[in-house]
Amino acid sequence: MKIDILTIFPNMFDGFLSESIIKRAIDKGLVQIKIHNIRDYSKDKHKKVDDYGFGGGKGMVLMPEPIFDAVDDIKTKDSKVILMTPQGKSYKQKIAYDLSKEKHLVIICGHYEGFDERIRTLADMEISIGDYVLTGGELASMVITDSIVRLIDGVIEEDSHLKDSFNDNLLDYPVYTKPVDFRGMKVPDVLLSGHHANIEKFRKEESLKRTKERRPDLLEKR
Ligand code: 6GU
């Protein structure tokens, strides 16, 4: 898969792309991620990309032309264009799964002060990562990219995402490692028993119990 991200803050992505599973996926050639500075597409001599909004009101508004030019340059017939905005569709694991099957994503990071309404016409999909306001779409674009890349074949063992929280609208069961007794808190006996059927049963029950307690809304979707 290829992912192109359009932003006015390209340096925000440095850490994200240079650590852990995302870095490994890039190094293994499983995903190509390119960060584009929208400023590079400005025709203005000062590389201006925003201006005052018509009709007044405070804050600067991202101008359409540099973003249209960037998308024209980057988009192909296989591309899906995503606009990050708090007004978008609420992001869920199901959307991550669907997007992980795409060939090419072009992600436009909006700015909290706003972007020209005409930019919306470029997007196949608008996404929000939750009901709170971020200073820009950059962190949100990293959140969705992370969740998509880990689902690409070969990035992590498939077994480990088939058991993810939210698959089947259930939260994860609890897991433990050494030591067996830590400050009086003991690992449940069943996990030490070696009895696989009982372990499976324990995990299913814990998963359900935890979902009931913490996210009853998810159970209604099952
Ligand atoms: Cl995609 N952008 C911004 N600026 N804030 C958000 C968001 C996106 N999703 C939730 N809050």
Image: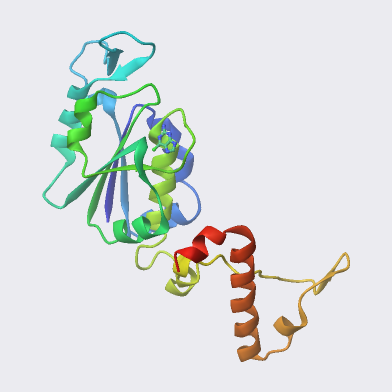
Q: Residue at x 35, y 63 (%)?
A: 152
Q: Residue at x 46, y 27 (%)?
A: 135
Quarter, ligand 1:
top left
Query: 43 left or right of 176?
Result: left
Location of residue 221 by image quarter: bottom left
Regarding residue 41, the answer to whether it shows in the image is: no
Where's the C terminus, which quadrant?
Answer: bottom left
Whole-percent x, y for residue 189 in the image: 77, 82
Q: Residue 137 in the image: x percent, y percent?
A: 39, 34
Please identify the residue farthest to the front as the structure is shown.
220
Q: Residue at x 51, y 66 (%)?
A: 219
Q: Is residue 182 above or below residue 31?
A: below
As displayed, is residue 212 above or below residue 40? Answer: below
Residue 139 in sight here: yes
The correct choice, above or below, for 44 with respect to 193 in the image is above
In percent of the image, x 79 and y 71: which residue is there?
179
Outermost residue toward the top in this view: 56
Quarter that holds the N terminus: bottom left
Question: In front here: 81 or 205?
Answer: 205
Closer to the camera, 12 or 81?
A: 81
User: Is residue 222 depicted above or below 110 in this figure?
Assistant: below
- Left or right, 22 with reference to 119: right
Which quadrant of the structure image shows residue 203?
bottom right
Residue 32 pos. (x, y %): 30, 51
